[in-house]
Amino acid sequence: MAFGFMLCSEQNPIKICKHCGKVFYAKNPKAEYDSSQCRNQANVYKSRNKNKDDKK
């Protein structure tokens, strides 16, 4: 029962990382990545793709 409430809680939802796809418990409701490493790696890939498009 408590697990069900935890899943439905809007304050601390369970989310899926945008980069690696792992399920994680978000301490911040606006969190998009499970770790700073995933966030950094996603930003590096985004930056590299942007630079690649600018060179064309």
Image (cartoon, rainbow, N blue to C red):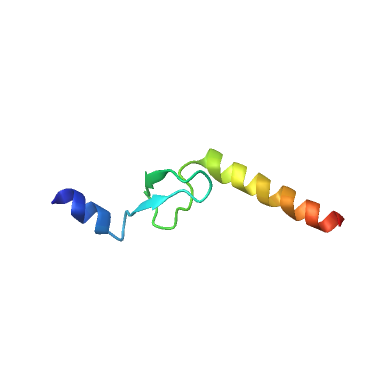
* Quarter where residue 38 is shown: top right
Which residue is situated farthest in the right direction here?
Answer: 56
Residue 49 lies left or right of residue 24; in this view the side is right
Residue 46 lies, in percent from the top left, at 67, 51
Give the number of marks: 0
Residue 25 lies, in percent from the top left, at 35, 46
55 and 40: which is toward the camera: 55
Residue 2 lies, in percent from the top left, at 16, 50
Classify 10 as above or below 22: below
What residue sits 71% from the left and 50% below the top?
Answer: 47
What residue sits 19% from the left and 53% below the top?
Answer: 4
What residue sits 31% from the left and 58% below the top?
Answer: 11
What residue sits 50% from the left and 51% below the top?
Answer: 18
16 and 34: which is toward the camera: 16
Residue 33 lies, in percent from the top left, at 48, 48
Which residue is situated farthest in the left direction here?
Answer: 1
| Quarter in which the C terminus is drawn | bottom right
Residue 43 lies left or right of residue 21; in this view the side is right
Which residue is situated farthest in the bottom direction here?
Answer: 10
Classify 1 as above or below 37: below
Residue 11 lies left or right of residue 53; in this view the side is left
* Quarter where residue 23 is shown: top left
